[in-house]
Structures are given as structure tokens and as C-alpha cells.
């Protein structure tokens, strides 16, 4: 039985790590991934380095080529069930 493996991503740096890991787990080079997406290897390198600067359309193309999907989670729905600890001064909220 296969289970869906999820990777919570809250920053573009985390997305960068996951994109590179997924590509390597698929045994693909940046060149091979670029060929699937229709871009050059240097564009894949740019996307992996800074995925926050890529269009959503192109990110979805890359994810599709990696046989991965973008899932959204409604965290507001679960916020009432378990209160999060108060953030310390100067720190982002715990749910971000």
C-alpha cells in the first residue's frame, strides 16, 4: 500500500531543498528535467537555487515533471483545535 509522502514548505529555501531532493530521487539531472519542462539546464539550476522567483506556472510544470504535486492545507481549520504557543518578541508566529 502506497502512502502519500508530504513535505511541509514554509520558505523558498525549504522548497529549494525539496525540489533538488525530488529530482535526485528520480535519478534525473538538471538537463533531463529541463528537457521534460522545455527549458535549459541553467533555468532548472536557477529554479532550484531560488524557487521563490519562479512563476507559479513554471513551478507547477517542474513539479509535474518530477511526478509531484502542490497541496494546500487549510491551517485555519485546525488552529482552534490546538492553540499554538505565543511567539517571543522578534520571532515569527509559530504557524509560519
Image (tube, rainbow, N blue to C red):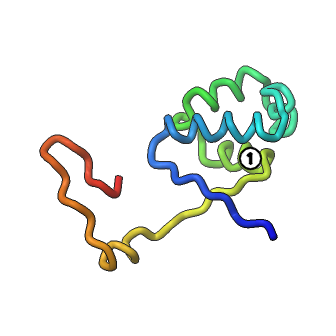
For residue 77, above or below residue 40:
below
Instruction: State left or right for residue 31 relative to residue 6.
Output: right
Instruction: State left or right for residue 46 relative to residue 79.
Output: right
The residue shown at (22%, 43%) is 91
The residue shown at (54%, 64%) is 72
In the figure, residue 36 lies in which quadrant? top right
Task: Tell me residue 82's x, y (percent).
Answer: 31, 73
- Which residue sits furthest front? 1
Instruction: State left or right for residue 96 relative to residue 66.
Output: left
Question: Which quarter of the rendering shows the N terminus?
Answer: bottom right
Mark 1 Cα shell of 10 Å, populated few (<14), some (14-19), many (≥20): some
In the figure, residue 45 lies in which quadrant? top right
Look at the numbered disc 1 and give the secondary structure of its residue.
Answer: helix
Instruction: State left or right for residue 79 relative to residue 22.
Output: left
Q: Which residue is mark 1?
A: 61
Task: Tell me residue 86's x, y (percent).
Answer: 18, 58
Task: Tell me residue 60's x, y (percent).
Answer: 68, 50
Task: Tell me residue 50's x, y (percent).
Answer: 55, 30
Amino acid at each position: 500500500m502506497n502512502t502519500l509522502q508530504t513535505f511541509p514548505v514554509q520558505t523558498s529555501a525549504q522548497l529549494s531543498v525539496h525540489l533538488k531532493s525530488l529530482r535526485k530521487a528520480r535519478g534525473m539531472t538538471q538537463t533531463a528535467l529541463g528537457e521534460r519542462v522545455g527549458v535549459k539546464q541553467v533555468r532548472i539550476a536557477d529554479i532550484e537555487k531560488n524557487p521563490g522567483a519562479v512563476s507559479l506556472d513554471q513551478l507547477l510544470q517542474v513539479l509535474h515533471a518530477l511526478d509531484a504535486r502542490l497541496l494546500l492545507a487549510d491551517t485555519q481549520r485546525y488552529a482552534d483545535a490546538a492553540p499554538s504557543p505565543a511567539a517571543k518578541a522578534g520571532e515569527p508566529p509559530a504557524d509560519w
